[in-house]
């Protein structure tokens, strides 16, 4: 095996190739130089191919390049050995190199034919130039389009900014209008879950409503009314309106379905003050009807008592006229402007002085200065009027010897006002509870946020009102 391998690199018994050329110097050097130049050219071509493949790693057919480099390198080597065999007969080595060159050449030839259709499918330089021209034109059009889009974007951004500013201004106007009007705007989805509320209500902040239902934020009775109203709007699609009591407040609720049908929008107006005013007006109307009857009874009682203490008809007319005038003046105290608060002493004097004859006083009153607001003046005046009217009809003021003491004091920020009757007919508790009883027990206590104690001992009626000192 070793000898077979070494014979490739040892001169054989054959003669060098130069012997065939008769060692003609010109002919020898012609072959030698030509083969050497060919070999150098062949060696330079693979180097160029390898340099190209090293730089262009993205080349799709790199293996073809390497195959060509091997083929050309083998060809160059065979030419070098052709020069060597001019002087040394290494024909086995030369033949082996030529065999390798033949194999590489054959493989290159066989693999090259399938690549020809793929190579033909590649665009020609003219086509590439045309494609580059079209691409450059497309790039220019895209650049112009991009410039147009940028201009359109700037225009849209400007319009959006203007619309946003307009919407912000509209929102400010909307919020201002809501704040000034006292209306609370609410939106709820199809499940009547709160999605928006313009301001807090019922002691809750706006965020406390979002994501919750009426059942979670309203008292049971208010929930039932509001839920039925809103559910009816969702089902019928028709607007609805109703007044809903919520705790100590009243709301006028206006409900409409949202344009997309996926919920409702509600406007809630606080009408608590209006309801209170309506209640007060109804109460005052009853008071007017009741007071007209009382005034007639008081006038009769004043006439009767004045007649008992008058010496003549002229004296009766003069004294009775003065009492009627005082009765009219006592009513004017309720018409005083709200910026001129009345005192408790003024209310007592205006309501009771008609029962005090300068020659025969039956009423005494005393206490410190206590300022009252208009509702307290009105309701306390009505209560004192009812007590005095009752006393003139049935109690201490119905007889000449009857007496009434009215005194008040202030302690720990609370006013205590006490009415006591004595010297009148024996007192019997009433068997029914009329409007006058409502005034002296319920109405006045509610107006001043106080409490009333009313007793009917036989020796004379007592009435006590306790209420916080008003600031």
Image: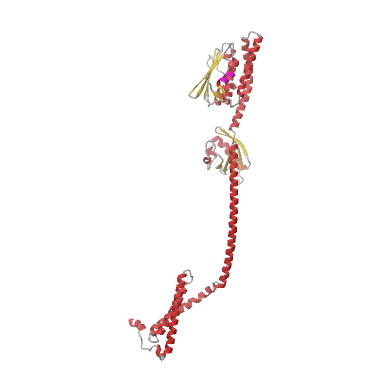
Q: Position of residue 406 (x, y in %)?
A: 54, 17
Q: Position of residue 392 (x, y in %)?
A: 59, 15
Q: Position of residue 347 (x, y in %)?
A: 57, 21
- Is 12 placed left or right of 55 in the picture? left
Determine the residue positioned at 64% across, 11% down: 316
Q: Is residue 134 above or below residue 399?
A: below
Residue situated furthest top in the rendering: 311
Q: Is residue 361 above or below residue 104?
A: above
- Is 447 placed left or right of 96 in the picture? right
Determine the residue positioned at 58% across, 41% down: 175
Residue situated furthest bottom in the rendering: 22
Camera-side residue: 276 or 331? 331
For residue 40, say whether it is visible: yes
Asked where in the image residue 329 lies, by quadrant, the reply is top right
Determine the residue positioned at 56% across, 20% down: 345
Asked where in the image residue 213 lies, by quadrant, the reply is top right
- Is 284 placed left or right of 67 in the picture? right
Is residue 268 within the magenta segment?
A: no
Camera-side residue: 77 or 448? 77
Q: Position of residue 162 (x, y in %)?
A: 60, 49
Q: Is residue 74 above or below residue 247?
A: below
Magenta stretch, overall SS: helix
Q: How is the image coloured?
A: secondary structure
Quadrant into which the N terminus falls: bottom left
Camera-side residue: 345 or 448? 345
For residue 393, say whether it is visible: no
Magenta-colored span = 345-350
Camera-side residue: 133 or 26? 26
């Amino acid at each position: 095996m070793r000898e077979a391998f070494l014979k490739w690199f040892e001169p054989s018994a054959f003669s060098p190739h130069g012997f065939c050329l008769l060692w003609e110097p010109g002919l020898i050097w012609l072959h030698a130089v030509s083969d050497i130049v060919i070999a150098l050219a062949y060696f330079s071509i693979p180097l160029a191919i390898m340099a190209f493949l090293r730089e262009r790693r993205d080349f799709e057919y790199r293996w073809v390049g390497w195959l060509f480099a091997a083929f050309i390198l083998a060809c160059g080597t065979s030419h070098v050995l052709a020069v060597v065999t001019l002087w040394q007969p290494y024909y086995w080595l030369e033949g082996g190199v030529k065999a390798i060159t033949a194999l590489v050449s054959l493989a290159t030839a066989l693999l090259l034919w399938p690549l020809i259709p793929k190579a033909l499918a590649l665009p020609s330089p003219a086509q590439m130039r045309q494609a580059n021209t079209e691409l450059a034109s497309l790039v220019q059009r895209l650049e112009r389009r991009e410039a147009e889009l940028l201009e359109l974007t700037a225009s849209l951004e400007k319009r959006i900014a203007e619309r946003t500013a307009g919407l912000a201004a509209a929102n400010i106007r909307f919020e201002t209008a809501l704040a000034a009007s006292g209306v609370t705007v609410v939106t709820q989805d199809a499940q009547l879950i709160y999605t928006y509320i313009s301001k807090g209500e019922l002691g809750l902040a706006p965020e406390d409503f979002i994501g919750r239902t009426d059942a979670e934020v309203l008292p049971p009775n208010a929930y039932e009314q509001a839920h039925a109203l809103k559910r009816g709007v969702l089902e019928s699609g028709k607007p609805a309106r109703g007044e809903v009591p919520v705790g100590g407040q009243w709301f006028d609720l206006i409900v409409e379905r949202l344009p997309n049908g996926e919920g409702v929008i509600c406007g809630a107006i606080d009408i608590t003050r209006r309801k209170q005013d309506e209640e007060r007006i109804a109460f005052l109307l009853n008071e007017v009807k009741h007071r007209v009857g009382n005034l007639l009874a008081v006038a009769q009682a004043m006439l009767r008592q004045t007649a008992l203490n008058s010496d003549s008809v002229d004296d009766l007319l003069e004294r009775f006229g003065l009492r009627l005038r005082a009765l009219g003046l006592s009513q004017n105290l309720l018409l005083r402007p709200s910026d001129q608060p009345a005192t408790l002493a003024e209310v007592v004097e205006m309501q009771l002085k008609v029962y005090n004859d300068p020659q025969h006083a039956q009423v005494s009153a005393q206490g410190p200065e206590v300022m009252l607001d208009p509702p307290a003046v009105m309701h306390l005046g009505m209560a004192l009027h009812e007590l005095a009217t009752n006393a003139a009809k049935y109690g201490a003021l119905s007889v000449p010897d009857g007496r009434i003491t009215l005194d008040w004091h202030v302690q720990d920020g609370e006013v205590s006002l006490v009415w006591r009757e004595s010297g009148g007919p024996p007192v019997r508790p009433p068997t029914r509870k009329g409007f006058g009883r409502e005034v002296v027990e319920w109405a006045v206590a509610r107006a001043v946020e106080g409490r009333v104690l009313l007793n009917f001992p036989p020796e004379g009626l007592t009435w006590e009102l306790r209420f916080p000192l008003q600031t």
